Image: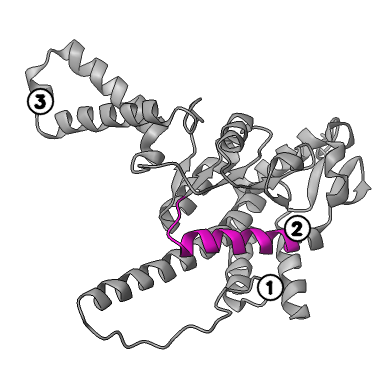
Amino acid sequence: MELEAKTLIKQLLEAGVHFGHQRNRWNPKMKEYIFAEKGGIYVIDLQKTVDALLKACDFLYDVARKGGSILFVGTKKQAQDIIKEAAEKSGTFYVSNRWLGGLLTNFETVRRSVARYNKIEGMKQDGSFKELSKKEESQLNKELLKLKKNLEGVREMKTLPTAIFIIDPARENIAVKEATKLHIPIVALVDTNCDPQLIDYVIPGNDDAIRSIRLITGIISDFVIRGRNEFAGGEVALEAAKAGKEVTHPEAPEEAKPALLIDDGLVEDAEAMERRFRHGKKEEKLEDEKLLRHKVPGKRPPTRRKE
């Protein structure tokens, strides 16, 4: 068990999860999650990150296992594609472009916008656009594009989510306020510039680096998938019981929750992911260099002198 824990910490280390913000941008409330300061940058305690990640995964696993819905939120450039990919993979809802004010607290109005989105798309599919003038068709296409961009991830969300997972709660402060007002539990990847007291399940870590976001989000989505699969299996068994059919499958042990630190599959996935990053993701390396320069003012990569 100790070996797997060290391996996971190694993956977090290689993904840069331990890098916090520079000293003058920190939030003092994050002090308990900080391990040290190096070169003007706070270093996050990865052992606390692992412990917090375990609690967050257990919580979201239970939500998914009981049939609850989860909303993934990440609108910053580094997180958009990762959040969308992870949400589609795990069958959850997502917001990756822009958080619409009132998405949770004014949910009925958002549902009317979704109905408008469905109506225009239906008109386009059944050929109704052909009966319109070019100007009207152009206006509807622009409206459809805008609605799709902002509502695609929550199009099928008929009710408020049971829980919400956020990348960078400081940026998504409106989402945090709305979820808090409605008492919706929040799980978040929290950097050293954020307020952890606003979050129910804090995962201390770098919320700027692509590799960090991808690794944490990937682990979260894996646990959600397992919970949803268990819920689906229970639904099948219930339907079979109602139909009077016998369901033959081995009973799950009482402690059926997946263990984060001893899961070889997760460790192997992280290792494979890290190999892909090291050998094929040059653009992500350049992005991380830009972020490092952003976090340490005045730090520039060495330039070759012209002779």
| Residues shaded magenta | 49-69
Nearer to us in this view, 234 or 295 = 234
Q: In this view, does 161 lie above or below 238?
A: above
Q: Position of residue 117 (x, y in %)?
A: 28, 29
Q: What element carries label 2?
A: helix
Dot 1, crowdedness within 10 Å: few (<14), some or many (≥20)? many
> Residue drawn 59% across and 33% down?
181
> Residue 174 appears in which quarter of the rendering?
top right
Which label sits in the foreground, 2 or 3? 2
Residue 246 falls left or right of residue 229: left
Q: Where does the image place residue 199, in percent across and percent down from the top left?
A: 69, 44
Is residue 39 among the parts visible in the rendering?
yes
* Label 1 SS: loop
Q: In this view, does 115 lie above or below 153?
A: above
Amino acid type of the residue tagged 1 in the rendering: Leu
Where does residue 83 sit, x and y in percent of width and height? 51, 47
Task: Read off the residue under disc 2.
Answer: 49
Question: For residue 105, which numbered disc appears in the image?
Answer: none
* Displayed quadrant of residue 303: top right
Which residue is most to the left? 131
Along the horizontal axis of the image, is 287 left or right of 100? right
